[in-house]
Image (cartoon, grey):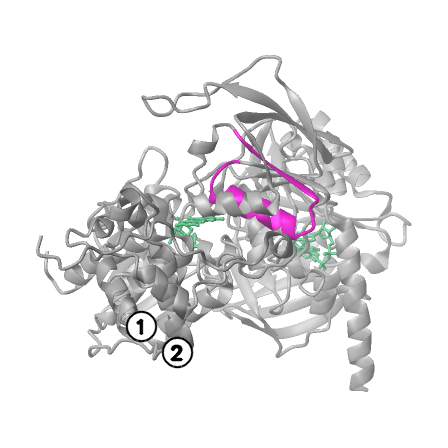
Amino acid sequence: MEEKKKPKIIPAKTPVPEQAPLARRSNFKEVSLGYTKELALEEASRCFGCKNRPCVGGCPVGVPIPEFIAFLKAGEFQKAINKIKETNLLPAVCGRVCPQENQCEKFCTLAKKHEAVAIGRLERFAADWERENGKGGTPPLPPPTGKKVAVVGSGPAGLTCAYDLAKQGHKVFIFEALHAPGGVLFYGIPEFRLPKDIVRREIESLRKMGVEIVTNAVIGKLITVDELLDDYDAVFISTGAGLPKFMNIEGENLNGVYSANEFLTRVNLMRAYQFPEYDTPIRVGERVAVVGGGNVAMDAARNALRLGAREVTLVYRRSEVELPARKEEVHHAREEGVRFELCVNPARIIGGNGWVEAIECVRMDLCEADESGRRSPKPITGSEFQIPVDTVIMAIGTGANPLVPQNTKGLALTKRGYIAADEETGKTSREGIYAGGDIVTGSATVISAMGAGRRAARAIHKYLSGEK
Amino acid sequence: MSAKIIEKKLIRPPDVFYYKVSAPLISKKARPGQFVIIRLNEKGERIPLSLADINPEEGTISLIVMAIGKTTSEMATMKAGDEILDLCGPLGQPTHIEKTGKVVLVGGGFGVAPLYPIAKAFKAAGNEVVTVMGARSRDLLVYEKEMNAVCDRVVVTTDDGSRGIKGPVTAALEQELSKGGADLVMAVGPAIMMKFVCRTTEPFKVKTIVSLNTIMIDGTGMCGGCRVRVGGETKFACADGPDFDGHLVDWDMLLGRQKMYVAQEKESFEAWKKRHAHAVSEGE
Ligand SMILES: Cc1cc2nc3c(=O)[nH]c(=O)nc-3n(C[C@H](O)[C@H](O)[C@H](O)COP(=O)(O)OP(=O)(O)OC[C@H]3O[C@@H](n4cnc5c(N)ncnc54)[C@H](O)[C@@H]3O)c2cc1C
Ligand SMILES: Cc1cc2nc3c(=O)[nH]c(=O)nc-3n(C[C@H](O)[C@H](O)[C@H](O)COP(=O)(O)OP(=O)(O)OC[C@H]3O[C@@H](n4cnc5c(N)ncnc54)[C@H](O)[C@@H]3O)c2cc1C
Ligand code: FES
């Protein structure tokens, strides 16, 4: 080694300022306040800038992590954010919601013995710094190519694909079913994790690049994909996995039982937390049970607290280690007072006069993973117990909305109803039709949806340029 | 996409309004039995409204709205030339139209309005179309003239006998079925009326289609708030419906779920009335 001096190891992440748990339980403001300049510099100094860059391999879009952190160390914040943006269109979003512990940070050299470098927090710092100080601006655009592309759905996959195609000079129209663009970033992920202003700004900068966004346009109903192909040179389908699943247990249709999608849509998209200033109502009551263990379940539980519930219990059929949510969200939910009933599954929902009164659960055996991975939990007979509740929120996953597939002839689907598309290019069974994001993979992550949008944009650009 | 109101009139005082709205794309795609979702302004709720007429040549759709709460009353204050902030559609499955023989349409209150395009379509498909329409009294009847123009026969009933047969629509329907039978019955109106129409048709074993009015948000199958039980299965009224076989519908669940927000709806309406009264007096 020709290193002059060994870098000093700082074992723990620089803590990030947060709203205190008790205070934030009753507001919708962002929980994590983000690093200050000083804290960011301190955290950046923990990075060795390893030559083999294991973290980059863990990032689904290959953000040049050591390089951007090196710019941060040097105080060159604009250069740092420019570096990130070479591969990541939405750093302010990803810095906040990516499951870093399973991606970049998992592979960090420091993480072998200590805590990983807080890559997500640094990414967020760089993005927020630019929003406040930098010259955001839009990238220079080449002369128009005269080609037109239709993007269906305005979640992270659609937004990324649109951005990359616009950057190549193609004219892009995004069609969105709801009245506001952003997909799950807008209607699903709560304000206290991802302020909607950030999403709005990202969408505004797309508009500035000439991307047209048509809202209230349900493709498959108002216009079919085939009709889009008459007017556009290519179509990218990124409609997400928005079909809520229910458990098909007794009592699921009682008043007071919500799908997480409905609950979160009322709160985020319709702003029911500001009722009656905003028209859309929501009912939470005193006690709430949330069924599920993913990010969606954590979001629903923490929203319920903020809407005034006194007691929120999360019911999950496996054990702690298998909770699919981001570690940070689980930690935050606990701090805020969400109760966890693990290795427990709902058996039925009990009601009176049409309203929920309790949820009956059963304890599960074999709910912890063994060497071979996941076992199937089995109910323990006689272990039934009831939790009295006013509201039950089902956050047990979503499936593919059949609207577009049903109305598009010859589009090959997977067994579970998702669109069959090539992983590298997003090509579907129909010429000129590409697909990516949750509608191809099933519920995944923001960053993987963005990656799919980016790869499809590359393939569509080639297709439009006549390369095969 | 926002949409301009081209024409508005009060068709049944004091609270039922007719709106003609500019919607070129929707009017080309919409089929009888489908609906739209509107949001009036930034703070507004999304509410579903049936298509009371579809005019692709003109590029318009018509809506008939009864002002019963906050959003519908706010809409009642809008004028021709005003813009509806969000108009989304066409949503839901179109009514299944085919030649079956004799079709009896049953409309309660302003539920007759969405039956108008459906009546036209059944007629055009070569059916004999009879409409049984009812209201509490003659002043509350809507679309009688329009229905007369497109149906073979229109039977009118009023609870107080001020026009047509005295009594509920179900009594007139029962008479119609015992006299001449029917190959298909379709009912649109308040859930409670549709429930009793289904009770009436059951002994006659006539297939009865109903158009369910659950509470909705997105209208695309994304939230499940509109779920109903039909034949023991959970269905989403916005995506799988709104039309279903009425003999298979769990009516009590539907009626119960419609009441989920009664308290909040009242609160919202009262708050709006106050703001509105204030705005009106400021304007004077
Ligand atoms: C509550 C919640 C919390 C989450 N938290 C995280 C997290 O912390 N970190 C993370 O990485 N991931 C998280 N996820 C997952 C992540 O949000 C998704 O994987 C990602 O948004 C998928 O992106 P997408 O572009 O494929 O689809 P979506 O974001 O689902 O967007 C699809 C869009 O298409 C529109 N659409 C659907 N059908 C039509 C149609 N027929 N016509 C026109 N438009 C249509 C929809 O309205 C929607 O706007 C979360 C998801 C949820 C629901
Ligand atoms: C498929 C469908 C078609 C409809 N067509 C028509 C129509 O053509 N003309 C018409 O006047 N009305 C129609 N309705 C009913 C209309 O949507 C409600 O009257 C309206 O939402 C009431 O809103 P509000 O704020 O004025 O009253 P509120 O006081 O908020 O509600 C009054 C009642 O309307 C129902 N309702 C409330 N919010 C919703 C909602 N978001 N979605 C559905 N129902 C709701 C509830 O049962 C409630 O008790 C239709 C409903 C459905 C589902
Ligand atoms: S209204 Fe949301 S699924 Fe039907």
Give A21 or B12, whichever is nearer the viewer. A21
Q: Is residue A151 magenta?
A: no
Residue B33 visible in the displayed image: no
Q: Are marks 2 and 1 in contact (CB under 8 Å)?
A: yes
Q: Which mark is residue A133?
A: 2
Question: What's the amino acid at mark 2?
Answer: Asn
Q: Amino acid at mark 1?
A: Phe
The numbered mark, 2 or 1, whose residue comes first in the sequence reads: 1
Q: Is residue B244 above or below residue A433?
A: above
Viewer can see residue A84 = yes
Residue at image point 26% right, 72% down: A79
Counting from the top left corner in percent of width and height, residue B199 is at: 74, 31
Dot 1: few (<14), some (14–19), or many (≥20) neighbours within 10 Å? many
Q: Quadrant of residue A134?
A: bottom left
Q: Residue at x 15, y 61 (%)?
A: A462
- Tell which subunit mark 1 falls on: A
Which residue is at the far front?
A5
Residues in magenta, as a range: A292-316
| Residue B44 at x, y percent in the picture | 64, 64
* Count of picture labels: 2
